[in-house]
Image: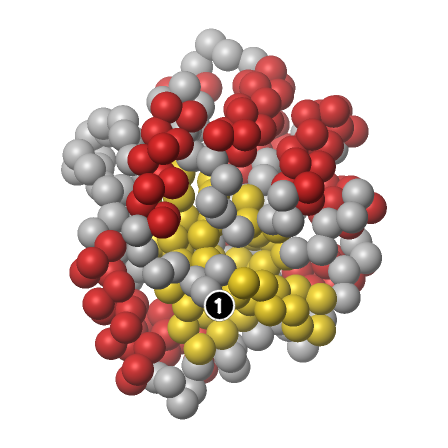
Amino acid sequence: MFPKSDYHLHTHNSGDSTVPMEDMIETAISLGLTDICFTDHLDLDYPHYDDLPDGAFDLDVEAYHKELSFYRDKYKDKINIGFGVEVGMQTHIAKENAAFVKSHPFDFVIASIHLINRKDPYYPDFWEGISPSEVLRDYFRLTLDNLLVFEDYDVLGHLDYLVRYAPDCFDAYSYSKYSDEIDAILLHVIKNDKGLDFNSKPLFKNNTAPNPHPDVLRRYKELGGKIITFGSDAHKTAGVAGAFDQMRDIAISCGFNEYCTFKNRTPIFHKL
């Protein structure tokens, strides 16, 4: 048995996906999910890369919402579909991000860091001539800096995401090495009644630890954290609810017996 909700899904409305929304819905239904939430990307002021058109992550939210509303009604007797967004945080656009969130009737908002100093660590040239371990420390500090100026979110997306792309960084990464920086993030999240996106993408794609690492999730629980959502971060149908059976076992081992879905920005708790 695995959690019946996938709360981190992308469609063709995101600049890095081409999958039709209905395909994701049909896949979720076939897997026995009862709840999903689409969280297509908004990354304002995203830098230019040759493999992406300019403005690739400037979400057309009106078209996105119209499409989602159509399918929400079509499949209302088969699955609950949430209207969400994944906001890419940068401190200099915090006000724009906050205004965007307030302007639309989202059920759920993920706040994520995808850029370091306006560069995307997904691309290998980001890592040329730098120390992965020190960049990772800077990434955690940058995460807190952004959370201090952007408050209108529900969960922090894929904490320790940077480890996915850092050369040889996974073997060197541990919670204990960055505990001061990570604890500061977790305490801020908890103090403000926010949660964590427990993200399975590294687990089902590369058989590495989910984001956040189980040691971080365990620490979040120890510090008083309660809100977690399960998300595959799938950009293709093959990833929907990826490795959720393993994710459930990890969450339970870290002390959790509940997970959340959201409606109108309010968490709803479910037993694991």
Q: Dot 1 lies on which element?
A: strand
Q: Residue at x 60, y 48 (%)?
A: 194
170 to 73, vertically: above or below: above
Along the line of sight, which residue is nearer the eye, 95 or 211?
95
Q: Residue at x 51, y 79 (%)?
A: 34
Where in the figure is residue 73, as x and y percent of width and height? 30, 82
Where in the figure is residue 44, as x and y percent of width and height? 29, 35
Along the line of sight, which residue is nearer the eye, 156 or 177?
156
Mark 1 sits on what residue? 263
Tally of marks: 1
Label 1 Cα neighbours within 10 Å, binned few <14 / some 14-19 / many ≥20? some
Where in the figure is residue 138, as x and y percent of width and height? 56, 19
Determine whether, in the image, residue 113 is placed left or right of residue 101: right
Determine whether, in the image, residue 25 is placed left or right of residue 53: right
Colour mode?
secondary structure
- The disc labelled 1 sits on which kind of residue? Lys
Along the line of sight, which residue is nearer the eye, 211 or 107?
107
Instruction: Report which quarter residue 63 is drawn in.
Output: bottom left
Q: Residue at x 42, y 87 (%)?
A: 78
77 to 51, vertically: above or below: below
Quadrant of the drawing holding the N terminus: bottom right
Where in the figure is residue 244, as x and y percent of width and height? 61, 65
Instruction: Report which quarter residue 247 is drawn in.
Output: bottom right
Q: Is residue 136 visible?
A: no
Q: Residue furthest bottom?
A: 77
Along the line of sight, which residue is nearer the eye, 98 or 128?
98
Q: Is residue 2 visible?
A: yes
Q: Residue at x 35, y 61 (%)?
A: 105
Quadrant of the drawing holding the C terminus: bottom right
